[in-house]
Each structure stands twice: as C-alpha cells, then as structure tokens.
C-alpha cells in the first residue's frame, strides 16, 4: 500500500542549557486509497520525530564539510525523512520517535536540502 505523508512546520525544541540542536518534525500519514473518501480524516495518523545533533558533532560537520551557516532545520529534516521512509516501508513507524545523529555520517548535499514545511511525499509499504 502506498502512504501519503504531509509534513507540518518543524519546531525547535532545543534545551538552551544543552550544547545541541533538537528539531521536532510533525507529519501525518494516510493510506492513499482513503484520499478523497469520508474515512480520510478519521484514518489520518499524526506522528512526530525529533532529530538531534550534539554541539561537538555539529561543529565537526561544519568544519569538515564547510557548512557554516547551513539551515540545520533542513539538514536534520533529511535524516528524519530517510528514517521515516524506512519505517513506513517496514511498517514499524511509531507515533513518536527520536533520532540522535551522534553516530551518523554527513551524507547530504547542502545545495539540495528540502524545506519540510508543507512537503508531501508518497512511500510504498513493503
């Protein structure tokens, strides 16, 4: 089954006392067969994923990849989106999940980062 995912406005939920960035990405998921039916609204599920990166890891990436001044909201969204797509494919997405990028490698082209607000994508379950 194919799912439609709509992303909403991300929220910075960073604790000011901690050297890190934490962004909450809210989104809805609905089965494509329900779109346009009376059941669409009732069956649409709300989800949230928080993506965080520590200050030292952020500093390393900025230095090593020359991304000073990058929009961290857009960069962290790429990790959120990849994670969420895999979870939907495997039917294991929870209502709330958290990702810490401590052990992640930098893997996105900064010139091709998407703005999550209002983005709609489609993902096929396996």
Image (tube, rainbow, N blue to C red):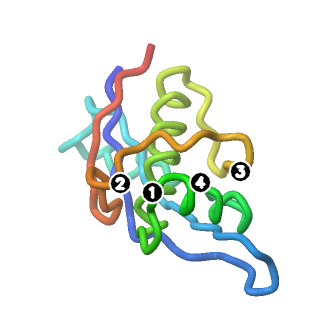
Q: Is residue 75 above or below residue 81?
A: below
Q: Is residue 118 above or below residue 108?
A: below
Q: Which residue is mark 2?
A: 110
Residue 27 in the image, given as x and y percentages of width and height: 44, 55
Q: Which residue is mark 4?
A: 49
Residue 100 in the image, given as x and y percentages of width and height: 71, 50
Q: Is residue 19 above or below residue 81?
A: below
Q: Is residue 25 left or right of residue 96?
A: left
Disc 3 versus disc 1: distance between alpha carbons?
13 Å
Q: Residues within 10 Å of mark 1 (few under 14, many from 20)?
A: many
Q: Earlier in the sequence, mark 2 or mark 3?
A: 3
Q: Earlier in the sequence, mark 4 or mark 1?
A: 4
Q: Which quadrant of the figure has residue 122?
A: top left
Q: Residue furthest right?
A: 17
Residue 117 in the image, given as x and y percentages of width and height: 32, 65
Are the two marked residues, 4 and 1, in contact with CB atoms closer than 8 angstroms? no
Q: Residue furthest left?
A: 36
Of circles 4 and 1, the one toward us is 1
Q: Earlier in the sequence, mark 1 or mark 2?
A: 1
For the residue pair 1 and 22, the one nearer the viewer reads as 22
Q: Which residue is mark 3?
A: 100
Q: Earlier in the sequence, mark 3 or mark 4?
A: 4
Q: Which residue is mark 1?
A: 75
- Which residue shows up at 54% across the image and 37% down it? 83
Of circles 3 and 4, the one toward us is 3
Are the two marked residues, 1 and 2, in contact with CB atoms closer than 8 angstroms? yes
Are the two marked residues, 3 and 1, in contact with CB atoms closer than 8 angstroms? no
Residue 104 in the image, given as x and y percentages of width and height: 65, 40
Disc 1 versus disc 2: distance between alpha carbons?
7 Å
Of circles 1 and 2, the one toward us is 2
For the residue pair 106 and 11, the one nearer the viewer reads as 106
Q: Quadrant of the N terminus?
A: top left
């Amino acid at each position: 089954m194919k799912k439609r995912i709509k992303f909403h406005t991300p929220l910075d939920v960073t604790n000011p006392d901690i050297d890190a960035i934490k962004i909450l990405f809210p989104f809805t998921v609905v089965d494509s067969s329900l779109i346009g039916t009376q059941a669409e609204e009732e069956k649409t599920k709300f989800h949230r994923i928080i993506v965080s990166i520590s200050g030292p890891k952020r500093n390393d990436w900025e230095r090593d990849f020359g991304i000073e001044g990058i929009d961290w909201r857009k960069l962290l969204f790429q990790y959120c989106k990849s994670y969420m797509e895999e979870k939907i494919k495997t039917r294991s997405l929870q209502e709330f999940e958290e990702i810490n990028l401590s052990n992640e490698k930098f893997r996105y082209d900064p010139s091709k980062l998407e703005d999550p607000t209002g983005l709609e994508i489609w993902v096929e379950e396996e």
